[in-house]
């Protein structure tokens, strides 16, 4: 697994959002590591459950900031967030049906981490720029 670590290239310039992104990256890494190391399914389900709950919390907070500040890309963000949450739900179903598999670990590492990094560096950084230009960041 190629380790993804937080660095300044992932910052959106909004402290609250950056801190939440750090947590999302760490939890995705934890989930991938749990699967790769063959941890018990209950532990993996617990990590995934936290990930699902935290993702929902983060996306709700992010969308609230966007709505309160008339962010023009809100609808696009909501669609992207819904797709990510649906993928997490599918991973949960796969885990419950098939147990921890190498394929599941790879999908988490490749798809979810890449999706999150791409989303942060594109869509979320545009949000950070928008909020900073309006003097609303930090």
Image: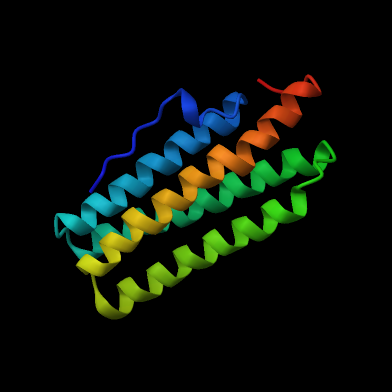
> Which residue corresponds to the image point at 36% horizontal and 49% vertical from the top-left?
28
Locate residue 73 relative to residue 32 in the image: left or right: right
> Which residue corresponds to the image point at 57% horizontal and 63% vertical from the top-left?
83
Q: What is the image's colouring?
A: rainbow
Front-most of 90 and 116? 116
Image quadrant where residue 108 sits: bottom left
Front-most of 46 and 132? 132
Image quadrant where residue 129 sits: top right
Residue projecting furthest to the bottom: 97
Name above or below for residue 100 compared with residue 60. Answer: below
Q: Position of residue 133 (x, y in %)?
A: 77, 22
Q: Position of residue 93 (x, y in %)?
A: 39, 75
Q: How many dots with numbers?
A: 0
> Which residue corresponds to the image point at 80% horizontal and 41% vertical from the top-left?
71
Image quadrant where residue 96 sits: bottom left
Residue projecting furthest to the right: 70
Is residue 136 in view from this perspective?
no
Q: Which quadrant: the C terminus?
A: top right
Q: Position of residue 26 (x, y in %)?
A: 36, 40
Is residue 97 in view from this perspective?
yes
Locate residue 85 relative to residue 73 in the image: left or right: left
Locate residue 81 relative to residue 127 in the image: left or right: left
């Amino acid at each position: 697994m190629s380790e993804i670590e937080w660095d300044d290239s992932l910052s959106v310039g909004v402290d609250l959002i950056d801190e939440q992104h750090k947590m999302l990256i760490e939890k995705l890494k934890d989930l991938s590591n749990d699967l790769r190391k063959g941890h018990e399914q209950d532990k993996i389900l617990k990590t995934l459950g936290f990930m699902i709950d935290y993702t929902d919390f983060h996306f709700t907070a992010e969308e609230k900031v966007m709505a309160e500040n008339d962010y023009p890309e809100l609808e696009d963000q909501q669609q992207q967030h819904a797709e990510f949450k649906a993928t997490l739900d599918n991973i949960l179903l796969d885990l419950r049906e098939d147990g921890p598999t190498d394929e599941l670990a790879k999908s988490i590492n490749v798809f979810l981490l890449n999706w999150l990094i791409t989303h942060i560096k594109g869509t979320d950084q545009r949000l950070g720029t928008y909020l900073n230009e309006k003097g609303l960041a930090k």
